[in-house]
Image (cartoon, coloured by chain):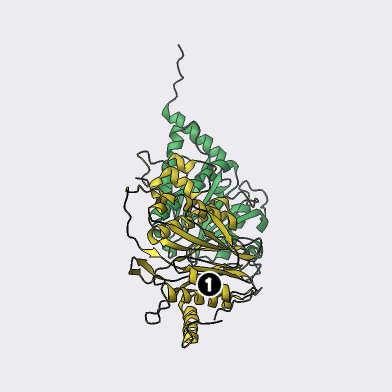
Chain colours: A yellow, B green
Amino acid sequence: MSLGFGGAGRLPAAFMTTGSSSFTEFISEHSPELLPSRRALPVGGTVEAPHGTTIVSLTYDGGVVMAGDRRATMGNLIANRDMDKVFGADEYSAVGIAGTAGLAIEVVKLFQVELEHYEKIEGTLLSVEGKANRLASMIRSNLAMAMQGLAVVPLFAGFDLDAMAGRIFSYDVTGGCYEEHDHHSVGSGSLFARGAMKKLWRPGMDSAAAVRVAVEALYDAADDDSATGGPDLGRRIWPTLAVVDAEGLRFLDDDALATVVEQIVADRRGNPGGAR
Amino acid sequence: MNMPFYVSPEQLMKDRADFARKGIARGRSVVVLGYDRGIVFVADNPSRALHKVSEIYDRIAFAAVGKYNEFENLRVAGVRYADLRGYSYDRRDVTARGLANAYAQTLGTVFTQESKPYEVEIVVAEVGENADQDQIYRLTYDGSVADEQGFIAMGGTGEHITTGLKERWSPGMSLGDALVLAVELLGQDPTGGPSRSLTAAQLEVAVLDRARPRRTFRRLAGQLLDALLSSEDPTTDVPPEDDPTPGRHDTLTGEAAGKDLPEPDLS
């Protein structure tokens, strides 16, 4: 077992190897079974597993916002109605996931440790591009799973401390990493969310306006995509929403979100197309 | 025929121990002591880049004296150990005791089996929910572990500092008082020579702050450290909030305090 240290009790050689500050590299040498992508796959057949759906992200003047709905679906069923699909990757970045939920959460967990590990060993933060590329290599190694229907497609948003601006990176299942400008969305409802953001996004918006646009886009996605969860006023389930700016990452609390969501729902009463 | 000289095991171990002890005593000292709201690490270390005190995990930190390459190797191993534990189980399941055991086994094996023992002495400290739950472990070159109460001084003039701490350290001291005491003892010359007065620039100071959520390790520098060391300034503890300056938030300098960043309006 990977966590036993052998009879001698001494830390194994992999712990003492010098030169690497990557946690993924370390565990691929020491205990590869912990890597999400190293699972032995059964031949043929696909598995039904919960799927996460829509994530939106958009930049504003001084930062970037990322939001995700809370629904996970399995076929025509709702597997989970209050799942968080937007995570803080480190102090200056957020990652949202669409695709097979179990695998995606594992990838995010590994990515979070990877960034913190680098930070502690090197004593400095990775650049935004560095973080985006690390995530790309994790998705790339997941290709075999993706071909069996267990795809993970993340969206990465970080604050660039050199340019002092928010940046967004999207991925494909082969690990391709593309920088997006202004706004982007992934997941089953992304077509509708992208359409909404295309109409609502303006250069020079402040954070409050960006938060509103993100929630509007998720509303539009939920309106037309059954796999995306809309605002649930009855259960008081709101989207997960992260804001990343010069001060770092923070998640909006429920009270702030309730205000935004209730406002949007009120504005759309009798006007289902919403803001224009 | 070539006959190897016989060396008794006692002599062999003693030679190795003497060798390691000499190497450790050559360096400058590090003091680790508990205060009312956490654990503070003070190193007589003018370098800003080569650290003697570092973060291992949320509530665990590492301090070392001796050969840099050897303790740096151990520090990296410790970060890997902690991150692997936290990744496989949960963040709460990473403990200083487990890490101290792994270090002890490693140092012990190196001491008896390799051609040269590690010339290092290290401290693994974990800040608990309250001062009674704080844990401070001292690990020496031969793999022995000691669970110390309240304070440790090691390297250089360590023994002299320990004597001073035994007389003057008390549980529940404020951070300011603990720092001033540590710095005064670090500057004393045990042979009776004149004391050095160490300034903030010559010190590496870090705390494990009990009150912080998640990662509790913070380095102290700049104005904040000056204020804590000064007898006139009323500052006796670290601020509860990190500096709002853009960049890594692992160092508290107090320099951006008072400079109000516009609060984002999210309503």
Residue at x-position 48% and y-position 41%: A16
Residue B134 rendering spot, x and y as whole percentages: 44, 60
Of A4 and A41, nearer the camera is: A41
Considering the image in quadrants, where does the N terminus of chain A appear?
A: top left
Residue B22 lies in quadrant: top right
Q: Is residue B54 visible?
A: no
Q: Which amino acid does label 1 sit on?
A: Gly
- Image check: A202 left or right of A105? right
Residue B245 rendering spot, x and y as whole percentages: 63, 66
With respect to residue B203, does A274 lie above or below? below
With respect to residue A215, does B66 lie above or below? above
Residue B81 rendering spot, x and y as whole percentages: 44, 49
Of B85 and B11, nearer the camera is: B85
| Residue at the extreme bottom | A270
> Would you call the spot at circle 1 few (<14 residues within 10 Å), some (14-19), or many (20 or more)?
some
Residue at x-position 59% and y-position 54%: B185
Residue B18 rendering spot, x and y as whole percentages: 51, 35
Of A180 and B136, nearer the camera is: A180
Q: Tell me the residue that label 1 is attached to.
A: A195
Residue at x-position 46% and y-position 59%: A153
Element class at badge 1: helix
- Image check: B32 left or right of A206? left
Q: Is residue A268 visible?
A: yes
Q: Mark 1 lies on which chain?
A: A
